[in-house]
Amino acid sequence: MCQNQRRDAFVSNSRISRRRFLGGAAIAAPAVMGLGGLAAQGGPAAAPAQASGGSTANGHAGHSDFPHAGFAKGRSVNHRFNGFNPTEVLRDFDYGKTRRLASGRVLREWEIVAQDKEIEVAPGVRYEAWTYNGRVPGPTLRAREGELLRIRFLNASTHPHTMHFHGIHSSLMDGMPGIGENRGAGQIEAGESFDYEFEATPFGLHLYHCHVAPLAAHIARGLYGAFIIDPKKGRPEADEMVMVMNGFDTNFDLANEVYAVNTVGFHYIDEPIRVARDELLRIYVVNVLEYDPINSFHVHANFFQYYPTGTSLEPSELTDTVIQGQAQRGILEMKFPFDGDYMFHAHVSEFAELGWSGFFRVGDPSRLSRSAAAAMYCDLPWGGGSPA
Ligand SMILES: [Cu+2]
């Protein structure tokens, strides 16, 4: 099925669950509530807040009374409204601030603020996210093996949160509710703060996320990010990027309506990722998806070396597809030997058609038509490019 037909069916059946739809439930798609109808409701500023309302203090929500996610034809997500753009998130590494301690060791520090924030996860689809530093995913924190790390966490959200890092550290620094509460650790209530401090180890690709219950809800809302610890000797020079595979349950029915890498569905079809031919590409891929047991990354017309968790400097496999459960992650390395547009997407086809797909644009951009790849793939809901 082409995506336009799917979205038409979506927006015209506000009470039907995505699972029933994908399972082949009989659906009529009255033209009156097609994509054109949604688009006519206005730009992002006027878009209905489909995900808002009904959520309770603990993050649970009612399930059936919200309109379903819809995609507005002819528009792109308003990145200025979001305050972040997935094209920039891709190569945005947050190294924090460093200083050398008397011992000679490097101390690396960040300030992370949890904030409630409405974001747009696909054109016209708003979501009441909970964020680290106002973005989803949170900043990609990057350090070097052996450094001392300090993360000053301030909870400016209206809900309790923590920062739970994957790595090796004491229980006090684990961001776990109930552990170290009498020392200011554990659950960090609204308005409270805590300094997490631990050594950067082991080197590899890790992640951080909130660990307050209900856990799935706190993670699904957007409280996660990639955490890279570079080996002491570094890795070979490369064009590096981060892809956090995520999704959004926009109507709080415990199933995702939108899938993406770095939050915005279909973003990298709308804006293909520019890469140079024959240059080493290194992609840090992290799966944080809730409500689905697996996710995957597949690239067309190429193979990559895969380093699971990035904890070894020797790759484990040369492949073109990798499967990850939640919190699994790995580093991909490849070169594109030919100019052109190359698709990458979840090889869970359902996810790909609901947003988790994009293109690498290899070579001289002046020789490649901007929307050609998208048009060849499918008739996208908003026409395969940015509106004028
Ligand atoms: Cu939380």
Image: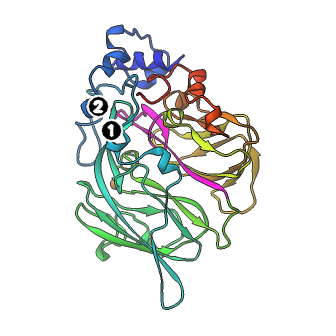
Q: Is residue 87 left or right of residue 213?
A: right
Q: Does the magenta segment cover residue 264?
A: yes
Measured along the vertical axis of the image, is residue 1 above or below residue 198? above
Residue 32 appears anywhere in the view: yes
Measured along the vertical axis of the image, is residue 194 above or below residue 357? below
Q: Does dot 2 land on a helix, a strand or a loop?
A: loop
Cβ at disc 1 under 8 Å from ligand 1: no
The residue shown at (61%, 37%) is 365
Q: Which mark is residue 127?
A: 1
Q: Does the magenta segment cover residue 208?
A: no
Residue 213 appears anywhere in the view: no
Q: Residue furthest bottom?
A: 102
- Residues under labels 1 and 2: Cα distance? 7 Å
Q: Where residue 183 sits: x, y (%)?
A: 31, 77
Measured along the vertical axis of the image, is residue 338 above or below residue 92? above
The residue to which callout 2 is attached is: 50
Cβ at disc 2 under 8 Å from ligand 1: no
Q: Is residue 314 left or right of residue 155?
A: right
Part of the protein shown in magenta: 238-265
Q: Where residue 72 sits: x, y (%)?
A: 37, 24
Q: Ligand 1: give its quadrant.
A: bottom left
Q: Is residue 324 left or right of residue 225?
A: right
> Depth check: 54 or 379 in front?
379
The residue shown at (57%, 41%) is 273
Q: Is residue 277 left or right of residue 36?
A: right
